[in-house]
Image (cartoon, rainbow, N blue to C red):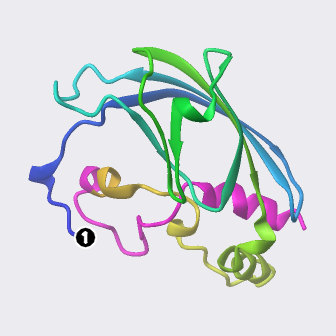
Amino acid sequence: MTVHRTAYMPPPWLVDDVRLVFDLDPRNTLVRASLSVRRNPQAAADAPAALVLDGEQLELLELRIDGQPLVPTDYRLDERTLSIEHVPERFELDTVARIDPQANTALKAMAAGLASSDTTIPLSHLVSLGPIGKLALGTEPPGLNANANVMSLITAGAALAE
Protein backbone atom coordinates (compact mmCIF):
# COMPACT_ATOMS: atom_id res chain seq x y z
CA MET A 1 0.00 0.00 0.00
CA THR A 2 1.40 3.37 -1.01
CA VAL A 3 0.72 6.26 1.35
CA HIS A 4 1.41 9.80 0.19
CA ARG A 5 2.38 12.69 2.42
CA THR A 6 -0.67 14.61 1.24
CA ALA A 7 -2.84 11.91 2.85
CA TYR A 8 -1.29 12.49 6.29
CA MET A 9 -3.69 13.09 9.16
CA PRO A 10 -2.47 13.68 12.72
CA PRO A 11 -3.11 10.59 14.85
CA PRO A 12 -6.19 10.82 17.08
CA TRP A 13 -4.23 9.68 20.16
CA LEU A 14 -0.81 10.50 21.58
CA VAL A 15 1.17 8.28 23.95
CA ASP A 16 3.26 10.41 26.32
CA ASP A 17 4.84 7.62 28.35
CA VAL A 18 5.37 3.87 27.94
CA ARG A 19 6.50 1.53 30.70
CA LEU A 20 7.19 -2.12 29.87
CA VAL A 21 7.97 -5.00 32.21
CA PHE A 22 8.95 -8.38 30.77
CA ASP A 23 8.80 -11.78 32.45
CA LEU A 24 10.90 -13.62 29.86
CA ASP A 25 10.30 -17.27 29.09
CA PRO A 26 10.88 -19.07 25.77
CA ARG A 27 7.29 -20.38 25.64
CA ASN A 28 5.34 -18.10 27.98
CA THR A 29 6.58 -14.52 28.13
CA LEU A 30 4.41 -12.03 30.02
CA VAL A 31 4.50 -8.39 28.95
CA ARG A 32 3.08 -5.72 31.25
CA ALA A 33 2.60 -2.38 29.53
CA SER A 34 1.44 0.94 30.96
CA LEU A 35 0.75 3.77 28.55
CA SER A 36 -0.13 7.39 29.33
CA VAL A 37 -2.55 8.26 26.53
CA ARG A 38 -4.28 11.51 25.58
CA ARG A 39 -6.38 12.73 22.71
CA ASN A 40 -4.33 14.66 20.17
CA PRO A 41 -5.53 18.29 20.13
CA GLN A 42 -4.31 18.57 16.51
CA ALA A 43 -6.34 15.58 15.30
CA ALA A 44 -9.16 16.24 12.89
CA ALA A 45 -12.56 16.82 14.45
CA ASP A 46 -13.89 13.77 12.63
CA ALA A 47 -10.96 11.54 13.71
CA PRO A 48 -12.01 8.14 15.07
CA ALA A 49 -12.80 8.25 18.78
CA ALA A 50 -11.69 4.68 19.42
CA LEU A 51 -8.20 3.85 20.59
CA VAL A 52 -6.82 1.20 18.24
CA LEU A 53 -3.62 -0.71 19.05
CA ASP A 54 -1.82 -3.18 16.80
CA GLY A 55 -0.48 -6.50 18.04
CA GLU A 56 -0.14 -10.01 16.68
CA GLN A 57 0.53 -13.43 18.14
CA LEU A 58 -0.35 -12.43 21.67
CA GLU A 59 -2.97 -13.35 24.24
CA LEU A 60 -4.54 -10.46 26.13
CA LEU A 61 -4.80 -11.36 29.83
CA GLU A 62 -5.65 -8.02 31.44
CA LEU A 63 -6.86 -4.64 30.24
CA ARG A 64 -7.43 -1.62 32.50
CA ILE A 65 -8.15 2.06 32.02
CA ASP A 66 -7.23 4.26 34.98
CA GLY A 67 -7.01 1.13 37.13
CA GLN A 68 -10.51 -0.12 36.26
CA PRO A 69 -10.65 -3.54 34.58
CA LEU A 70 -12.41 -3.72 31.23
CA VAL A 71 -14.67 -6.63 30.36
CA PRO A 72 -14.83 -8.12 26.83
CA THR A 73 -17.93 -6.06 25.98
CA ASP A 74 -15.86 -2.88 26.57
CA TYR A 75 -13.47 -3.57 23.68
CA ARG A 76 -13.02 -5.45 20.41
CA LEU A 77 -10.09 -7.82 19.92
CA ASP A 78 -9.14 -9.60 16.71
CA GLU A 79 -5.98 -11.23 15.31
CA ARG A 80 -4.32 -7.88 14.62
CA THR A 81 -5.92 -5.12 16.70
CA LEU A 82 -7.39 -4.12 20.02
CA SER A 83 -10.05 -1.39 19.74
CA ILE A 84 -11.51 0.44 22.72
CA GLU A 85 -14.47 2.62 21.75
CA HIS A 86 -15.28 4.63 24.88
CA VAL A 87 -12.18 6.18 26.42
CA PRO A 88 -11.63 9.45 28.30
CA GLU A 89 -9.67 12.38 26.85
CA ARG A 90 -6.65 11.39 28.97
CA PHE A 91 -6.03 8.05 30.69
CA GLU A 92 -3.61 5.34 31.79
CA LEU A 93 -3.91 2.11 29.82
CA ASP A 94 -2.52 -1.01 31.51
CA THR A 95 -2.27 -4.33 29.71
CA VAL A 96 -0.87 -7.76 30.44
CA ALA A 97 -0.28 -10.00 27.45
CA ARG A 98 1.22 -13.45 26.99
CA ILE A 99 3.38 -14.27 23.99
CA ASP A 100 5.05 -17.46 22.80
CA PRO A 101 8.41 -16.46 21.28
CA GLN A 102 9.18 -20.02 20.15
CA ALA A 103 6.05 -20.09 18.01
CA ASN A 104 7.30 -17.11 15.98
CA THR A 105 9.61 -18.78 13.46
CA ALA A 106 10.84 -15.50 11.93
CA LEU A 107 12.08 -14.27 15.28
CA LYS A 108 13.58 -17.65 16.16
CA ALA A 109 15.64 -17.50 12.97
CA MET A 110 16.70 -13.94 13.76
CA ALA A 111 17.70 -14.85 17.32
CA ALA A 112 19.64 -17.89 16.13
CA GLY A 113 21.52 -15.71 13.65
CA LEU A 114 22.64 -13.29 16.34
CA ALA A 115 25.49 -15.61 17.22
CA SER A 116 27.13 -14.62 13.93
CA SER A 117 29.26 -11.47 14.19
CA ASP A 118 28.19 -10.28 10.75
CA THR A 119 24.44 -10.56 11.36
CA THR A 120 22.41 -7.46 10.54
CA ILE A 121 18.93 -7.17 12.02
CA PRO A 122 16.57 -5.13 9.86
CA LEU A 123 14.79 -2.41 11.78
CA SER A 124 11.57 -3.95 10.50
CA HIS A 125 12.10 -6.88 12.89
CA LEU A 126 12.15 -4.51 15.85
CA VAL A 127 9.84 -1.55 15.31
CA SER A 128 6.58 -0.94 13.49
CA LEU A 129 6.38 2.56 12.10
CA GLY A 130 3.24 1.81 10.10
CA PRO A 131 1.74 4.18 7.55
CA ILE A 132 2.07 7.22 9.84
CA GLY A 133 5.77 6.54 10.39
CA LYS A 134 6.32 6.18 6.67
CA LEU A 135 4.63 9.53 6.14
CA ALA A 136 6.75 11.18 8.81
CA LEU A 137 9.88 9.84 7.12
CA GLY A 138 8.64 10.76 3.65
CA THR A 139 10.29 7.70 2.14
CA GLU A 140 11.82 4.59 3.56
CA PRO A 141 15.60 5.03 3.95
CA PRO A 142 17.73 2.11 2.70
CA GLY A 143 17.57 -0.79 5.11
CA LEU A 144 14.39 0.44 6.75
CA ASN A 145 11.27 -1.61 6.26
CA ALA A 146 8.47 -0.06 8.27
CA ASN A 147 6.02 -2.95 7.94
CA ALA A 148 6.98 -4.98 11.03
CA ASN A 149 4.91 -5.54 14.14
CA VAL A 150 5.59 -3.44 17.28
CA MET A 151 5.48 -6.61 19.36
CA SER A 152 8.50 -7.92 17.43
CA LEU A 153 10.89 -6.12 19.78
CA ILE A 154 9.28 -7.74 22.80
CA THR A 155 9.20 -11.14 21.15
CA ALA A 156 12.80 -10.81 20.00
CA GLY A 157 13.92 -10.11 23.56
CA ALA A 158 12.08 -13.18 24.77
CA ALA A 159 13.53 -15.32 21.97
CA LEU A 160 17.03 -14.19 22.94
CA ALA A 161 16.38 -15.18 26.56
CA GLU A 162 16.32 -18.87 25.58
Residue 34, quarter of the rendered image: top right
Q: Residue at x 71, y 64 (%)?
A: 156
Residue 76 screen position, x and y as percent? 50, 42
Which residue sits at x=82%, y=66%? 160
The image position of residue 105, as x and y in percent, is 70, 80
Q: Residue at x 49, y 65 (%)?
A: 148
> At 48% across and 24% down in the image, what residue appears?
37
Q: Secondary structure at mark 1?
A: loop
Locate the C terminus and report the quarter of the image it occupies.
bottom right
* 137 magenta-colored: yes
Question: Which residue in the protein does label 1 denote?
Answer: 1
Task: Tell me the magenta residue range.
Answer: 135-162
Look at label 1 and name its amino acid: Met
| Left or right of residue 39, residue 127 in this image | right
- Residue 134 or residue 116, whichever sits in front: 134
- Is 151 located above or below residue 41 in the figure? below
* Image coordinates for residue 136, horizontal then vertical, percent: 27, 49
Left or right of 160? Residue 47 is left
Against 161, residue 107 (above or below) is below
Q: Nearer the viewer, residue 117 or 22?
A: 22
The answer to if 152 sits in the magenta stretch is: yes
